[in-house]
Image: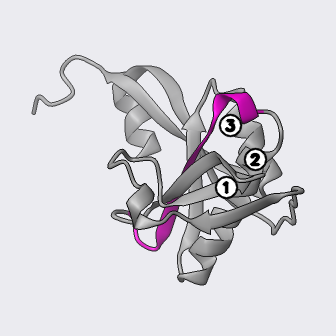
Amino acid sequence: MCPLLFRHSKGIRAESILFRGRHTTNIQLADTHFTRKALRESSGADEGDFIVVHKDEVVASGGLMLNYNFPYADIYMGVEERFRGQGFGSYIVQELKKYAYAIGRVPAARCNINNVVSHFTLLKAGFEVCGYRLTGDLQPGFLQA
C-alpha cells in the first residue's frame, strides 16, 4: 500500500505510531492491583473492562479491542489526571498485554504521533514501534481511467 500512497498522494504524513509487543515487563506498584471491572461498575461509556486500583481508588481503566484485525488485540487505556506520571499507565498496559496473550491474542497498540507521554508509556510496558499509520491527499486525476 505504501507505494500507492507515495505514487498518488501529496502531503503525506504520519497520524499514528503503531506498536507491537517486544518483551515482558515486571512493573510492580505498591498498594496497587489490576482487576476486571464488575458489571455493576460499568457506566456504559467505552472506558474498558479492566481497572487499576491503588489504595482502594480506581486510578486507571482500559481494555482490548477484539472486534477487528484478528488475531490482534488493540490495547487502550486512560489514567485519571491526578494519578498521571506515577507509572499506572505502563502498569495497566503491561497487565492488558498479559491478558491478551492469555486469551490467545497478539497485543498491539497505537497512539497519536504527537502524544509523547503515551509513546513512552507503551515503550516502558514492553512495546516497540513497528510502523506508522500514514495518510495523504490524493492527487487530482487519480481515479480517472
Name the residue at 81% across, 69% down: 24
CB of mark 3 within 8 Å of CB of mark 1? no
Which residue in the protein does label 2 denote? 88
Residue denoted by label 3: 118
Mark 3 or 2: in front is 2
Residue 6 at what x, y percent from top left? Answer: 44, 31
Q: How far apart are marks 2 and 1 (CA)?
A: 7 Å
Q: Earlier in the sequence, mark 2 or mark 1?
A: 1
Task: Give the left or right position of residue 122, taking residue 77 as reference.
Answer: right
Looking at marks 3 and 2 on the same chain, the residue that comes earlier in the sequence is marked by: 2
> Which amino acid, mark 2?
Phe
Residue 121, disc? none
| Pointers 2 and 1 in contact (C-beta within 8 Å) | yes
Q: Can residue 75 be seen in this view?
A: no
C-alpha distance separating marks 3 and 2: 12 Å
Region of the chain picked out in magenta, as a range: 69-84
At horizontal 53% and vertical 76% (from top left) the residue drawn is: 105
Residue 141: quarter of image = top left
Real-space CA distance between mark 3 and mark 1, rounded to the nearest whole angstrom: 17 Å
Tell me the number on the disc at residue 52.
Answer: 1
- Identify the residue shown where x is 87% and y is 66%: 26
